[in-house]
Image (spheres, rainbow, N blue to C red):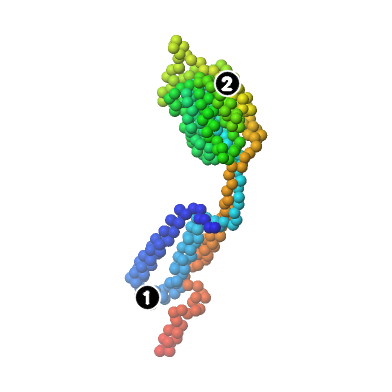
Amino acid sequence: MFVLEEKIWFWLLLVIPVIIFLFLIFIFWQSRTRKKFASRNLLKHLAPNRSRSKPIIKLVLFLLALASLTLALVNPKMGTKLKTVKREGVDIVFAIDVSKSMDAEDIAPSRIEKSKQLVSQILNSLGSDRVGLIAYAGGAYPQLPITTDYSAARMFLQALNTDMISSQGTAIGDAIELATTYYDDAQQTNRVLIIISDGEDHEGNVEEFTEQASEMGIRIFTIGVGTDKGGPIPIKRNGVIQNYKKDNRGETVITKLNPATLQEIAEATEGSYISGNVTSEVTERITEELQNIEKTEFEAKQFADFKSHFQLFLGIALALLFLDIFVLERSTAWLRKLNLFNERKKKGAKDGSK
């Protein structure tokens, strides 16, 4: 099996006909200039060592070196053997609270930004696990289906904000129910749901959905983001705080972390509750928990083990350029001995006529 890794470098070969064209123009100009300066016979006596073939040889060597260098940049690869790669992991769904209470800045820089940092660090610690993403507030909405594309997961993660869902509230139950639809029943993978929230639940029915998740073999880990002291909910415009959310009596609303709800959800599904204040501790705890979960083989692929062969063409290019240095444009002694232009006979004929 043969593969060309960087085909775009083939465009460099277009330089070759341009160089040949410029060389022909130079030879034509050089020939016309010499004819104006002296006759052909006189030029032979003025420049007896001038070679007609050497410039062409040097050009050919340079063009061959350029072609070899181009092939080295293209990096041709040969497939030597087939390998079967088995991927084992866990299906992990992240459900992130994007309600307005997550704008509170009782934990720096804010609850929502802290949640995104936590998920990002967890993604960095994963190996071959598959991940999905859910955002929820007054309702739950899918953001990214189960995938091994961590780059896509990070892109969707960074797009999360508290303005993306108009219906406010914290429907943790809806998030759990939606998560149950993410997993592939056919592959029977081990399933994990990680809920990141301040724990405020205004919709109820959490127990019902938690029981459903437990029956499906889904382990739920909850991460509490916020402080017991709490903080006000800022109202921002263009990233600048204009005011703070107030209740019907005109008093500033203080939102606090409610770990009790999150702990109940985790315990009901044999999961764990983790405080989200310290990012490194959260990552370590999640990593430890995932290591204790049996991995499931969910993907096996065969592919050719390709080996690069650019070194060969790079070596040829360097050798040709090195050889080009030692090819002089004047005739060498061994070429003169060949008497290609029969100079000695002409000289002898002239002596005989005398």
Mark count:
2
For the C terminus, give its image quadrant. bottom left
Q: Is residue 38 above or below residue 297?
A: below
Q: Is residue 283 visible?
A: no
For the N terminus, give its image quadrant. bottom right
**Residue underneath mark 2:** 261
Report the residue at 45% width, 17% height from top.
245
Q: Position of residue 158 (x, y in %)?
A: 49, 32
**Residue underneath mark 1:** 40
Q: Position of residue 222 (x, y in %)?
A: 58, 26
Left or right placement of residue 22 versus residue 157 in this view: left
The residue furthest left is 36
Q: Is residue 4 above or below residue 192?
A: below
At label 1, which amino acid type do we have?
Arg
Report the residue at 48% width, 65% height from top.
61
Q: Position of residue 69 (x, y in %)?
A: 50, 58
Which element type, helix, strand or loop, lies under badge 1? helix
Q: Position of residue 239 (x, y in %)?
A: 44, 25
Q: Is residue 89 visible?
A: yes
Which one is in front in this view, the residue at disc 2 or the one at disc 1?
2
Label located before the other in sequence (2 or 1): 1
The residue furthest right is 292
Mark-to-mark CA distance, 2 and 1: 102 Å
Report the residue at 59% width, 46% height from top.
300
